[in-house]
């Protein structure tokens, strides 16, 4: 008795290969896949550093700016390149009657280009530095730095308004444009 090898027709093999390729493509193109939006935003957010793509990559599949040999945590994107929103300000209550802007009252003060004095108390092991970056009319322009982090702006503030900066809430009590000084209180 002779044994004949079982041959698979080429058309069946091609059909199975085509079905496999289509199922793989369909699995990678789901509606909940955020990759197209992220990859469109990646070049704008990753120009702050990392490896540069000089077009010599063998794969041609990556244009994130990192080579295939680089370790990656997110396609070369960096949080340092993304601007941070300013800390929001809560308006003064409706019944608040603002005194003269330059009242000279407040537990903490900051001169233009300097951080507030005295130092604000630590909270949860972190420190807060508040710097006066400008004065426009009766509005103070402040920035806040938590611990060793980078400075983040605070929306322009005037008397009676508050801003919550992580675990601290400050309230502007005096804005003196003629002496470039702002005073504020810490609300517990």
Image (spheres, rainbow, N blue to C red):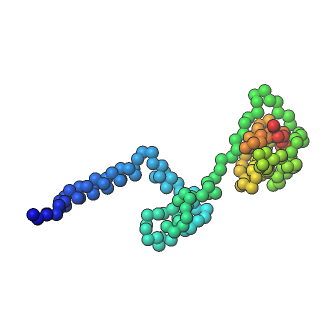
Q: Is residue 24 left or right of residue 159?
A: left
Image coords of residue 180 (percent x, y): 84, 50
Give whichever of 163, 155 is nearer the camera: 163
Q: Is residue 151 visible?
A: yes
Q: Quadrant of residue 10?
A: bottom left
Image coords of residue 110 (percent x, y): 84, 49
Q: Is residue 47 left or right of residue 103?
A: left
Q: Is residue 91 left or right of residue 9?
A: right
Q: Is residue 110 visible?
A: no
Give whichever of 13, 103 is nearer the camera: 13
Give whichever of 55, 172 is nearer the camera: 55
The image shows a total of numbered marks equal to 0
Residue furthest front in the image: 1
Rendered view: 187 above or below 47: above
For the N terminus, give its image quadrant. bottom left
Q: Quadrant of residue 140?
A: top right
Residue at 58% from the left image edge and 62% from the top image edge: 47
Rendered view: 31 above or below 82: above
Residue at 70% from the left image edge and 41% from the top image edge: 88
Residue at 85% from the left image edge and 49% from the top image edge: 119
Residue furthest right in the image: 104
Image coords of residue 165 (percent x, y): 74, 44
For the C terminus, give its image quadrant. top right
Residue furthest bottom in the image: 56
Residue at 53% from the left image edge and 65% from the top image edge: 66
Give whichever of 16, 51 is nearer the camera: 16
Q: Is residue 172 left or right of residue 43?
A: right
Residue furthest left in the image: 1
Rendered view: 45 above or below 177: below
């Amino acid at each position: 008795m002779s044994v004949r090898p079982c041959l698979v027709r080429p058309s069946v093999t091609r059909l199975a290969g085509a079905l496999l390729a289509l199922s793989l493509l369909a699995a990678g193109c789901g509606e909940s896949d955020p990759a197209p939006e992220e990859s469109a935003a990646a070049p704008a957010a990753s120009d702050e550093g990392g490896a540069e793509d000089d077009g010599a990559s063998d794969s041609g599949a990556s244009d994130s700016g990192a080579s295939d040999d680089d370790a990656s945590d997110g396609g070369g994107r960096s949080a340092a390149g993304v601007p941070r929103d300013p800390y929001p300000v809560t308006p003064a209550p409706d019944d608040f009657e603002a005194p003269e802007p330059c009242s000279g009252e407040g537990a903490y003060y900051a001169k233009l280009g300097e951080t507030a004095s005295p130092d604000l108390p630590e909270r949860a092991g972190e420190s807060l530095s508040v710097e006066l970056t400008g004065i426009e009319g009766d509005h103070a322009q402040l920035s806040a730095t938590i611990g060793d982090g980078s400075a983040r702006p605070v929306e322009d503030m005037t008397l009676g308004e508050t801003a919550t900066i992580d675990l601290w809430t400050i309230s502007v009590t005096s804005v003196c444009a003629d002496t470039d000084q702002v005073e504020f209180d810490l609300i517990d």
